[in-house]
Image (cartoon, grey):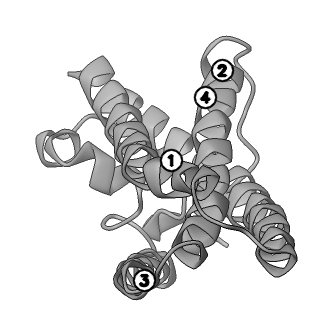
Amino acid sequence: MKLLGCVWGVGGVFILLLFAIYRLAPMALALEDASMELTHWFFLAVSISYMAYAEGIKGFHQGFAPRVVKRALYLKQNPRLSYVMFAPFFCMSYFCATKKRQISSLGLTGLIVCFVILVRLLSQPWRGILDAGVVTGLTIGCGSILYFLYLATIRAETIPISADFPWEEKES
C-alpha cells in the first residue's frame, strides 16, 4: 500500500495534466489552418512566453510539482487508506493541508474552471492562441513533476519546499 499511494498520487496528477494537454493541443494546433495576422502572431508569442513563465516555471516548477511529489513521498512513508484512495487529491493539497493551502488549491481550481468556460466561447485564432500558452505551461508542469520525482527517488535529494501539512503550520 505504501508504493501504491505514491504512484497513484503522482500518476493521477500526471494523468490529469496529460489529459488537459490532450484536450487543448488540437485547438492550439488548429492555428496552422487559421489565417493569422501580425497581431495574432504577437499575442501567440506573448501567450506562450507568459504561460511558460507564470504557469510553467512559477506555478508548476517552483510550487505545485515539488509539493505534489513531496506529498506523494509522505504517502509512501505514512500510508492511510483514506489518503491512498484519494491520493491525487491529497497530493494536490485538497485535504490534509493548511487552511491557506486548501483555500489556495480549491480557489485556483475554481478559477481554472471559469477560465476554461470563458476560453471555450472564443473563436479561432484567439482560442488557439490561449490554448497554446496553456499547453506550454502544462507541458512544463509535467516535466517538472518528472524532474522532482527523479530528484527525490533516484538522486535521493530533499525537496526544498513545504508540503503544507497542518502540523507544519503549528511548528513554524
How far is disc 1 from disc 2 in space, using C-alphas?
13 Å
Q: Amino acid at mark 4?
A: Leu
Which label number is shown at residue 68? 1
Quick check: 114 left or right of 159?
left
How far is disc 3 from disc 1 in space, using C-alphas?
17 Å
- Circle 4 or circle 3, nearest the eye: 4
Q: Say if mark 2 contacts mark 4, CB within 8 Å.
A: yes
Q: Say if mark 3 contacts mark 1, CB within 8 Å.
A: no
Q: Amino acid at mark 3?
A: Lys
The answer to which quarter of the image holds residue 56 is bottom right
Residue under label 4: 146
Quick check: 88 left or right of 93?
left
Q: Amino acid at mark 1?
A: Val
Q: Amino acid at mark 2?
A: Tyr
> Residue 69's spot in the image, x, y percent?
53, 39
Residue under label 2: 150
> Residue 127's spot in the image, x, y percent?
52, 73
Q: Quadrant of the C terminus?
A: bottom right
Q: Quadrant of the N terminus?
A: top left
Residue at 38% across, 86% down:
121
Q: On screen, 31 above or below 94?
A: above
Residue under label 3: 99
